[in-house]
Amino acid sequence: MNLLREELSWITPELCLTLFACVALLVDLFVQKGRESVMVGFFSLMGLLATAFFLYRQYGVTPPAQPVFGCMVVDPFSTLFKLFAVGALAFVVLFTMLSRQTRPDGYGEFYFILLCAGLGAFFLASTYNLLLMYLGLELLSIASYILAGYAKGNRRSGEAAMKYVIFGAVASGVMLYGFTLLYGMTGSIDLTVIGPKLRDQFALDHGTIPISVATGLCLAGFAYKISAAPFHFWTPDVYEGAPTPVTTFLAVASKGAGFAALLRFLQAGFIPDRTLGGPEAMMGYSDKLGTLVAVLAALTMTLGNLAALGQTNLKRMLAYSSIAHAGYVLMGVATMNREGFSSVLFYLVVYYFMNLGAFGVVMYYANTTGDEQIDDLKGLGWRSPLVAITMVAFLVALVGLPPTAGFIGKWFLFTAAVKKGFLWLAVVAGINSAISLFYYFRVARAMWLRPEEEAKYATVHASPAFAALLLVLAVGTVWFGVGFDSLLRYCDYSQNLLR
Amino acid sequence: MSASLALSLWLQSARLQQQTGAALGSTTAPDSNWTLDLLEWVRTSWLSTKLAGLAGMDQAPALPTWAAAAIGAGIAVGIVIGFVSVVAMFSIWLERRVAGRIQSRIGPNRVGPFGLLQSLADGVKLLLKEDIIPSGADRKLFVLAPALVMASALAMFAAVPMADGAGFTDINLGVLFIVGISALATIGVIMAGWSSNNKWALYGAMREAAQVVSYEVPLGISLLVPVIVGGTLELGAASRLQSGWGGSCWFLFQNPFVLPAFVLYFIAALAENKRAPFDLPESESELVAGFHTEYSGIRFSFFFLEEYAAMFLMSAVGTALFLGGWNFPGIDLLKGGWLIAAQLAVFVVKSMFLVLLMIWIRWTLPRMRVDQVMVMGYKYLTPLSLICVVGASVWEVWAAVPFHERPIWMQLFTPVLVFGVCAVLGAMLRKQAIESAAQPTTRSRIAPRAHAAAH
Amino acid sequence: MELLFFLLFAGLAIAGAVATVWMRYVVHSAFALMGTFLGVAGLYVLLGADFLAITQILIYVGGILVLILFGIMLTPPDRTERNAKRVIGFSASLVAIALFLAVQIGSVVRWAEKSNLEAPKATAAPIGRELLRPDGYLIPFELVSVVLLVALIGSVFIARRRKAVRVDDSSTAAILAERGTLQQKAGA
C-alpha cells in the first residue's frame, strides 16, 4: 500500500490535471448562462496552476530509479516538457477566454477536451513504453481533432477537422504497424528493453532491412505529429480552419509533445551508448538514421519556407512557418547526440514564446476585425502600437535575428549540426532563414510602412489583459535572447539525466 | 447455407478443442468427449465387427482424428438444428395460442392435439412454396442473409449448457460468446434489408442496426451483474454455483441489485430480439414486414425460426445467470440419468416461461415510436444498468465472502427485500385497480366503449 | 486438425480482405469485411486467446461493422467511384504485398524467440488481473478510459443539434429515391 502511495505521489500532476478537466466539465453545468467562458476558464487555470505547482515540486528531486507503475518515467526531461505543455495550455485557455471565436455553448466540453489533450502530451513526454506512448498520442490526436472542428457552423473548421482525422488515422495506423514490427523483433514494448535487444541483433549483423522498415514506419507517425515533410499536408488547412486558440495549441503544445516522444524514441532505441561501445553496425545505423532525419529536415524547412512566401492569409502563413520551424528543430534531432538534443529543447522553449505571441496577435486582430489577411494589417503600427511592436519582436525572433531568443536558439542548432558534420544542412538552413525574412517582413511592412490612411479598419484597442499577455511573451522572447544562460543550463540538466 | 455450416463447424471445433483441453482451457474439466465415445462404440459394435470380418479384418479400423471430429461435429450440428427447430416451432405454436387467448379467440387447434402440429404443417407449406428472389435484388446477399441469421442462432446454442455434464459444451466465456455471436444476426438482418432493394426492407434494416447497437450496451452491462456475483463468465459454472439450499440459491436472490439487473436484461433482450414493444424493424403497420418484406418460402422460414430461437436463447441465458439454471428445489434427490433429464426439463421449462413472458408482453403492450426506443435505451436502461453494476460490486466487496459462506441474515436479506418490494408494488397496483374500477369516468380513456356498454 | 482450421480461418481472413478491396460496391466490401473479422477471431482461438477472439467479434462485428454499414447506407451510393481507381489500387496493392513479403521474409530469422515472450494470458480472469495490477497495465488501462471519455464527449458535442429534432426516416427515403433512379439508369 505504501508503495502504491509513493508511486501515486509521482503522478500527482497527471492526476491533478485529470481531476480539474472533469471539474471544468461539471462546473459548466452549474454556472449562470453567459458567464461560462470566464468561470470554466478560471477553474481550468486553477487546475493548470496546481499542476504546475506539483511539477515544480518534482523538479530537482531525485527521480525514481524504476519507472513509476512500470511504465511512466519521471525525470527532468519529462518535467520540462510537462511544464512546457502546462504553460502553453494556460495561454491557450487565456486566449480562449479573451476570444470570441468559440461557440457560446460547450465551454465546459471545450476546456475539458483541451486539458485532456494536455494530459496526452504529458504521457507522450514521459514514457518509454510504446503502448503508453501510442495512447498518449491518440489522446492528444483525438482531442485535437475535436478541437479543430469546434467552430461547428464554420465550414472551414469542419474541413480542418475532417482532414486532420483522415491524415491522423492513417499516420497512427502506420506508426502502430512500426511498433508491432519492433515488438515482433524484440518481444517487448518497452523501449529500454528494445534498445539492448536491437543492439544484440545488430551484433549478429544480419542486415538492417527489417529494423529500417520498422523505424521508418514509426518515424512517419512522429513526422506527422510534428508536421515534418512529407507528412505536413494537413498543417496549413487545419491551422487555418481551426479556431485560433486551438491552432496555437496545435502549433505549440502538440508539436512539442511530438518532439519529446521522438527524442525519447530515438535516444532509448537507436543511439548506441558510445562510452560502452556498441556493435559497429549499430553505430553505422544510428548515423544513417541521422542522415535520413537531416534530409527530412532540409526538405521540411525548404518546403515550409517556399510555400509561406506566397501566402496572403496570416494563419496560413504561420502554419507554413511552423512547418519550416519543425525543419530547423529536426536539424538538432539529426545530430543524434546529447548536444543536438539539448539544442532541440532550447529551441522548443524559444519557439513556444514566439509562436504563442504571433498567434496571440493574429487572434487579437481576427477578433477585433474578423479578418486574417496580411494586407489588411495596414496601419496597425500607428493605430495600436503596443500590439504591433510586440508582433515585430515575435517576427524578428521567428526569422532568428540577433537581439532575440530566436537567434540564440538557431545558433545552438546550427553549431550542433556543424559539429556533427552536417555543414550542408547548416548552409541550407541559413539560406532558408534568409528566405523567411521576406515573408515575415511583409507583415511588418504592412503594419508600419504603409500610411495610416490606407488602413482598412478603425482603431482597435487591445484589452489590458491581452496587452499584458502579449507583453509577457514579448519580454520572454527578448529576454532569452540576452540572458539565456539559465535556460541553457536547465535544458542541459534535463538532457543529462535522460540517460 | 454454407456459411451456416462453416460457422457451426467452427464452433464444434472449439468444442472439440475444449474437450481435449487444448485451446479454450475451461476451468471445469470435461468429463468425456462423447462424440468420440460414440464413434468408438459404433466401431466396436457387433455390426461393425461383422462388416470388418467380411472385409477380412478382425476389427474395424479406427477413424483418423479429423474424420472423427468431422463426424462428431456433424452429429452435434444435427442435434442442435433439431433442437432449435423443435423449440422454435413450439414457441410459434405457443405464441399463436397465447395471442388467441388474449384476443378472445381460439387460435390454431386443428392440426394435432391442441394444434400442436400446426407449426410443422406451416413449415411443410413454407418448404413447398415458390422461392422468389426479386428481380432488383442483390442475389448473392439476398441468399446469404437468411443463412447468416440462422447460423448465428445455431452457433449460440452451442454455448448453452442445459444440464450438468451430459455433453453440453461449457465455453468458459459463454456469456460473452453469446452476446458476441448475436451480432452476426444483426449483420444478417442488415444484409437482408439492403439486398432486398425495397424501401420497407431498408427502413427495417436501419432501425434494426440502430436498435441493436443501442441495446447491446445495457444488455451486456446488466449481464455483468450476475457475472460479478458469481465470479464467472461460464454459464455452466454459474448454474452449478446456484445449487444448494434445496435448489433455491439463485443469483436473483443473492444481491439486491440482481433483480433490477434482471428486469433491465429482460427489457434489453426484448429489444435485441425485435420483440414488441420494440418490434420497429418489422412493424407491420408502417413497414409491411420490415427487413423480410421480400422474403418468402424457406428463406422466410429461416428468419421466422431465428426469431423464436433467439427468444429462447436470450431466455436461456437469463435462466442460467439469474434464475438458477437447471436448479430447482428438491432436484438434488435424483440420481444419474434421471437427474440429467430433470435438469434438462427444469432448464427448458424455466426458459419457456420467459419466452411466455415475452409473448405475453407482445400481445399486451402497444409498439413504441423510434425516438422513444432510443431514449429508453440511452437515457434509462444504460444508466440504470451501470448503477446496478456499481451497486452489485459494492455489495459484493462489502459482503467480502462468496455468497455460499455468508451469514444467514445476509443470505435472507435480499429475498426478503425482493419479496417485500414485490408485495408493496402489488398492493399499490391492486389498490389503484380497485379505485379505477370504482371511478370509471376518470379513467375511461382507454376503453370508453366498454364502459359505455357496461352502463 | 489444427492446420486444417488454421487454413480455414486464414483463408477466410485473406479472402475477406481481398474482397474488401476488390468488390465493386462499397456495401459488398463492408460485408466482406465480416469475413476478415471472423477469420481473425478464429486465428485468435487457435492461438489460445479466446477472450480476444470473442471481444473481436463483439466489438468489430457487433459494433464497428454495423456502424460502417449504417454509415454506408446513409450515404448516397456512387457506383462509378470504384471502377476508375482499380488499376491504381491493383498496382498499389501489389507493391504493398511485395514490400510486406520482403520485410517478413527478410526478417523471419530475427523475430523474438517464442521462449522469450510471456505465455499468453488468454482468458478473462488473468487479463483482468493484469489490467489492474499497478506494475502491469494499470496506467494504460486508465488512460484508455480518458481517451474514450474524450472521444465520447467530443462526438456528442459534434453530433448534437441545436434544437431537439425528432428522429425520422427522411434521409433514408432520399437515399432510396436516388438509388432507384440510379438503377433505372443502369437498366436503361
Image (cartoon, rainbow, N blue to C red):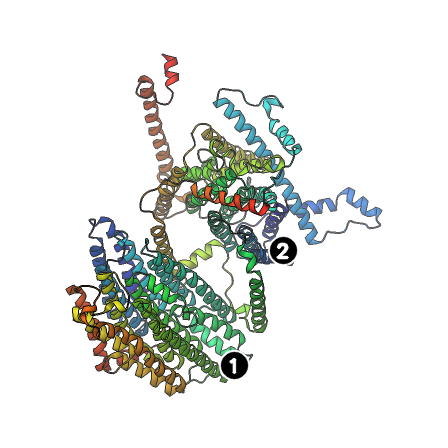
**x, y percent for residue C1:** 65, 56
User: Which residue is labeled 2 in the image?
Assistant: C8
Q: Chain of mark 1?
A: A
Query: Mark 2 packing: few (<14 Cα in 10 Å), some, or many (20+)?
Result: some
- Number of marks in the rendered image: 2
Residues A52 and B424: in front is A52
Q: Which residue in the rendered view is the most extreme toward the top?
A: B455
Res. A117 visible in picture: yes
**What mark, if any, has residue A203 been given in the picture?**
1
* Disc 2 secondary structure class: helix
Please tell me whether mark 2 or mark 1 is closer to you in this view: 2
Residue C80's image quarter? bottom right
Q: Is residue C120 above or below residue A411?
A: above
- Whether residues under marks 2 and 1 lie with C-beta atoms below 8 angstroms apart, the answer is no
On the rendered image, what quadrant is the N terminus of chain A found in? bottom left
**Three-letter amino acid code at disc 2?**
Leu
Q: Quadrant of the C terminus of chain A?
A: bottom left
Q: Residue at x 27, y 69 (%)?
A: A375
Return the residue nearer the eye: A201 or B304: B304
> Residue C70, position in %: x, y?
47, 47
Q: CA distance from mark 2 to mark 1?
A: 40 Å
Q: Observer-nearest residue: C2 or A303?
A: A303
Q: Is residue A50 visible?
A: no
Q: Are marks 2 and 1 on the same chain?
A: no
Question: Disc 1 marks which amino acid?
Answer: Ala
Q: Position of residue B421 (x, y in %)?
A: 34, 32
Position in image of residue B332 (x %, y %): 52, 36
Residue at 61% across / 26% down in the picture? B118
SS at mark 1?
Answer: helix
Drawn side of residue A157 relative to residue A24, left or right:
right
